[in-house]
Amino acid sequence: MAGGGRGFNGVSPVEKVVRYTLLVFVLVITIGPFLWQLSTSLKGIGEDVYTQTPSFIPQQPTLGNYAEVTETIPVWAYAGNSLFVAFIVVAGNAVGATLAGFALAKLRFRGSKPALGLFLATLVLPGEVTIISQYVIVRGLGFADSLVGVALPGALQMLNVLLMRTAFLSIPKDIDSAAIIDGATVWQRLVHIGLPNVRGMLSVVVIFSFIYAWDDFLWPLIVLTDPDKYTLTVGLQYLNGTFTSNPRLIAAGTMIAFLPIVAVFAVLQRFFFKGVEAGAIKG
Amino acid sequence: MGRNWVGLAAAAVALSTLAACGLGGPETSSAPAASASGEVKGKVSLQTWALKPKFTDYVQGVIDSFEKKYPGVEVQWLDQPGDGYSEKVLTQASGGSLPDVTNLPPDFALPLVKNGLLVDVAAADPKVAEDYVPGGVEGYRYAGFDGVYGYPWYLNTDVNYWNTELLTKNGLDPEALPTDLDGLIAQAKVMKERSGGKAYLMSRKPTLIDLTNAGVQVMAPDGKSFTFNTPEAAAILDKYRDAFKQGLMPRDVLTTKYAGNTALFNSRTVAWTTAGGNYITSLATDNPSLAPKVVPSPAFGTPPLYVQGLSIPKSTKNLPAAIALARWVTNAENQAAFAHLVNIFPSTKASASDPFFSQSDGTHSGDAKVIAFTSLAKAKILQPVQVTQAMSDFVDQQFALAISGDESSQKALDDAVAKCDQLLNG
């Protein structure tokens, strides 16, 4: 590129500047608050947290806040509880949404249209509206105050089913028809034609449901009574007590809770961006 | 928080629906299911709101002494996280699993009272009105419902806090602080001129509390309609509108919600805020270099009274122990011990003569404690408990419209009253 003439895909310097300015602008407004949290979590006890112009460089940097968080609450036990819930939710969504999405996209059966309509209808209701009846049901099933009860309602999310349905729909009909002519059963069509083409979307579903399960606060709070069973988001609330809330500790707790999400994304991001190309359909 | 409050409103609606269907199965008779005058023993549960881990030792100490006093009683202590507490309580109520003694501020208790889920403690324990300060007991009386639905626990009020550094830098005297709204506006003008509009004195728009303070009757005595669309109320809004027009308040105040004034104060944009008696102590954690420069003064007009209390659900299986425990936690000694740990104030009459509260240790935080304590004698609950978060939000928006000049004050008030009435009876 250097010094050469510009081809069709070349970008004029002015446009380049504009593009980068916009990108940097968006970057700043998205990660600004995050960086502020990070810097707050590293600030010493003698430093002001709230200032007229936010300062991002801690004057008295310390890791003491992180140590204090782990002393105040059993972070590892809570993280373990969160992982358990996240595992059930991710597994439920990966399997359930794939099967349901495939059925809705590729199988013809009586009532498939109304079924899809019902799936869409549940998306309209905000979770808060149904939370009490949901609690009464989970309690009736005997899962009150248990991690299974926390995970169950999120273990199959309608949005994920719709995402998987869309992914399966994008596989051309011809490929599927060819398989049917070759005598493939429904399972074979799912495993050999469907799945290889929806890996990208599947990783999206995994990441989304992991973040959902990991970040959920209100539902675990309502289901759980025993503090030993708290998930990390609920347990971190102990840092924010009546008359006592040290913003540095809260920020450190937030950072601790954030790490696993980074880890999951880091592991899955190559599927996230590349998965779609890996199937049989190219170009 | 905003999202949670939407949830609360939705949950409250769901709760009343459930109760109406009888799904929650609450007893609607006013007599408690169990007898109050039994022996104090067996299991009893206590639910507090975000007191762990800072007050773990204190609460555990209170529980241990209770178990020692009544051998054979076993207390299970649950401490709920701060966020989402209202939703937690509402789901516990609809599931019939409220702990025997539950910490509920008056506005959280209201939906439960409406559904007949709480014990009238005045009926079960006639000495309530004798032992606790009237303001505290008043907090748990509801228009349209007979009885008292909670033991008053700790009290707090608002105190004015001033940033002396900003005041002196801009030609104002920390010894001659404003004592009412007009004084505040006058000094705010000086502040604006001297600082070239960089620092402010006024930090918030008015709330229903300010209207009550100006003698406006916010609600009809029967608690069934709102009445704050009076010319006096419009006059208050006009004062704020003029102040806003002259640039005496940061623009943010129109959009910020409750506690926005404290945030502006913490960042040294404004030199005045109102907050509870404990504010300087918590500021010392947030902004250590600001805390020593802050001085307190009494709130303008009638100070607001904030009450926490312990309620007992009708579903309790151990009423004698629940009453004994609620009384134990709220007795004068235990409340005084609590108040020594943090700037809160006991609701027991016996504590009024405790010199600890009327003598400052010389620090600004100590002064704030004494100011708050003396304010409590005349403090009142200024915002009716019927006002839900949804109503406050709407009122807030209407006040913002009036102050920005987009709408006349009277029209904003009329709209706010109409909407609040609709939410109240809807």
Image (cartoon, rainbow, N blue to C red):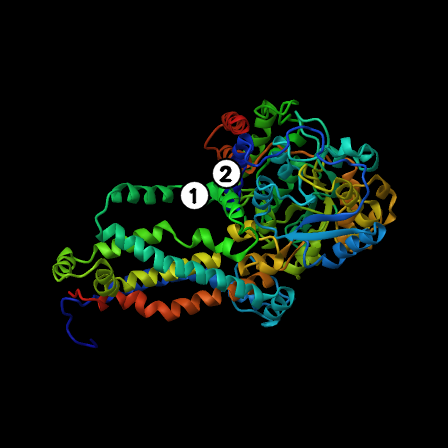
> Looking at this view, is B312 or B366 the one in front?
B312
Q: Does mark 2 fall on the same chain as mark 1? A: no
- Assign a secondary structure to mark 1: loop
Which residue does the numbered mark 1 point to in the structure image? Answer: A126
> Looking at this view, is B130 or B323 the one in front?
B323
Q: Is residue A65 above or below residue A211?
A: below
Q: Report x, y in % for residue B90.
A: 58, 41
Q: Report x, y in % for residue B125.
A: 80, 34
Residue B30 position by quadrant? top right
Q: Do the residues labelled 1 and 2 touch (CB within 8 Å)?
A: yes
Which residue does the numbered mark 2 point to in the structure image? Answer: B10
The number of numbered badges drawn on the structure is: 2
Q: Which residue is drawn at 59% across and 36% down?
A: B206
Q: In this view, does A164 lie to the left or right of B299?
A: left
Q: Which residue is drawn at 26% across and 42% down?
A: A111
Q: In this view, does A253 lie to the left or right of B358?
A: left
